[in-house]
Image: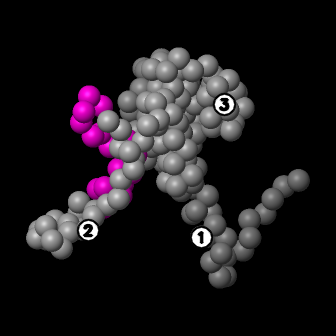
Amino acid sequence: SIQNEGGAPVLKSGFNRWKAAMEINKGKPRAQQMRLRCVLNRASALETTVGNIHENVYRNPVTALDDAHNIARLIDRYGKTEEECAATYQQPVKWIKARLKLLKLSEESQRALTNGDIKLSAAQQLAAMTTEQQKEKLHGGKNGTSNGSQKRPSVKAQQEAAKMVADSPGVPAPVRAF
């Protein structure tokens, strides 16, 4: 959708469709270019922002950090309360508060969360720490490694290795003490 801002059309939603059309149209003569139908949206900036949030949540995979930034924008720019944000996201206020805490993550911790290097639960714990403490936790110690010489495998890597060994023919199952 497009809004009229000071006499100029401004794209407010449909960014992915627009980018896809621009990519498809590259190098084509104007007569052969794909055209997009646009709708003039008379909604307020807040209504458009909420509409974009709903579109993204239901159409695209959205990260917890995306949610956090959008919630902060609703609160800071539009004066929404946490309760109103909870209604927008159809989530409890506790969920809103947890997402907002993620904004306290250092850039490095945010990257680790976005890249899938740490789980959301770990990121929520890191968010309560100082930047230095987050760095130390991310790197397993002050030297950047768990024992100063080599990096410890992640829990996921350890689990995958254990599964590979357990699934290997001729390898006895581990003995468990009860």
In this picture, residue 34 sits left or right of residue 144: left
Q: Where is residue 153 in the image (x, y as percent from the top left)?
A: 50, 50
Q: Whole-Å distance between the Cαs marked 2 and 3?
A: 39 Å
The residue beneath circle 1 is 164
- Residue extending farthest to the bottom is 169
Question: Which numbered disc, 1 or 2, marks the residue closer to the eye?
Answer: 2
| Crowd tier of the residue under label 2, counting other residues whose Cα lies within 10 Å: few below 14, some 14–19, many 20 or above | few
Q: What residue type is labelled 2?
A: Met
Q: What residue type is labelled 1?
A: Met
Q: Where is residue 93 in the image (x, y as percent from the top left)?
A: 69, 27
The residue beneath circle 2 is 34
The residue beneath circle 3 is 86
Residue drawn 67% across and 32% down? 87
Residue drawn 74% across and 70% down? 173
Q: Which amino acid does label 3 sit on?
A: Ala
Q: Give the range drawn in magenta.
A: 5-20
